[in-house]
Amino acid sequence: MIPVTKPHLPEMNRYLGYIVRCYKNCQLTNNGPLVQELKARLEGYLGVQNLLPVANGTLALQIAYRALGVTGKAVTTPFTFVATSSSLRWEGIEPAFADIDGATLDLSPERAREVLDPDITALVPVHVYGNPCNVEAFDRIAREHDLKVIYDAAHAFGVELNGRSVLEWGDAATLSFHATKVFHSVEGGAIVFKRREDYERACRLINFGYAEGKVIDEGINAKMSEFHAAMGLSVLDEIETVLQKRGEIHRRYYEALEDHFEMPAWGEGATRNYAYFPVLFSSESELLAVQRRLNEVGIFPRRYFYPSLDTLGPAGVCPVSRDRARRVLCLPMYPALPEDVLEKIISIMASSRRPWIRAVHPGRSSMEG
């Protein structure tokens, strides 16, 4: 079976070298030396400060909301993984869904403005598939309305926008280090804070609210363990090889399918980490037919994201998101994808549609890069 993704497992002796250190240190959690090393190396690799490793990407979001004092309601996108909105609800914050930009598939700043009301205290945009949002527009909205901005950057590991890390935007940006991500620690995540004081409060929050041996805040346990940090360090040692292989597969897909399928318009000035390869069909019925053909030969792409989250509750109707969610399919993308399988996927996809003339979206670059 060929899944949509498969975790990268680093060379075993490399991983075991870090595990031996865990045994020698005999400190398995509570901000141990491997977690501290991972933090420092990630800050250097990503070009950021105030990075806090945590147990997973969902807790990263929840800790960010709590550290920044988000209450009431928050504007977010329905075209995302369910954790973006469920993490808000778990913190007692009501998601206010705004529609997406039909070309980029990111939250539309214009639609976000339309749903603002006095109870909204934050914006929670998502860099969908690692494609940076219109960060300058969201920054303006936040300044005008005194809102916090927390970016769900689960897909955006290593992505830069105009020469700087996309994680530098907003009051905070969160990462997921789940096993299926470009960079992973089996389970894990991180938060990058703009302000040191927010980072320091989050450090307390992930450790039950402790500081200097006593509880001074209402916290929870969201710490990363040493064994998870060991995997993260091992993967980080090999990340350039991972990105190179993913990039090669991405280019093969793009060159073969660019004239057959619509693809999300990529942010101008943005790099990419080749996390996903989404294509848009002309209709849901066409998507389902091709998906069946792929499944019949043991290939399982994913309808990511489906359904649009505004269909699951009363938080607003977003027609563009609903339309794109019905028509988008992510093709298998991981470094160990076999060459013959890649060719089979391309053949089935290309033969399913005649070539067409792609639309050019003003201000956005192509998928190529």
Image (cartoon, helix red, strand yellow):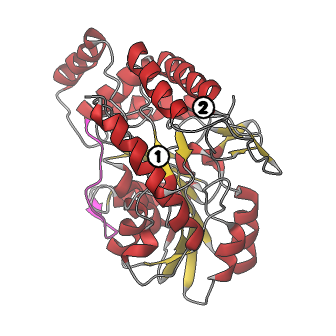
Whether residue 83 sits left or right of residue 251 in the image: it is left
Instruction: Name the secondary structure under disc 2.
Output: helix
State the residue at coordinates (50%, 18%).
245
Q: How far across and down, in percent of the image, does residue 96 sit?
A: 51, 78
Task: Give the labeled residue for mark 1.
Answer: 329
Dividing the picture into quadrants, the one containing residue 232 is top left
Number of residues whose C-alpha sits closer than 10 Å to that of mark 1, classed few (under 14), some (14–19) or many (20 or more): many
Query: Which residues lie in the magenta part?
Result: 214-225
Whether residue 340 sits left or right of residue 258 in the image: it is left
Instruction: Name the secondary structure under disc 1.
Output: strand
Up/down of 286 relative to 269, above or below: below
Up/down of 292 relative to 255, above or below: below
Front-most of residues 247 and 36? 247
State the residue at coordinates (56%, 27%).
253
Instruction: Provide the major secondary structure of the magenta segment.
Output: loop
- At label 1, which amino acid type do we have? Leu
Q: Gap between marks 1 and 2, in whole Å?
A: 13 Å
Q: Nearer the viewer, mark 1 or mark 2?
A: 2
State the residue at coordinates (49%, 15%).
241
**Which quadrant holds the N terminus?**
top left
Q: How far across and down, in percent of the image, does residue 209 sit?
A: 31, 63
Whether residue 39 sits left or right of residue 121 in the image: it is left
Task: Give the labeled residue for mark 2.
Answer: 257
Outermost residue toward the right in this view: 362
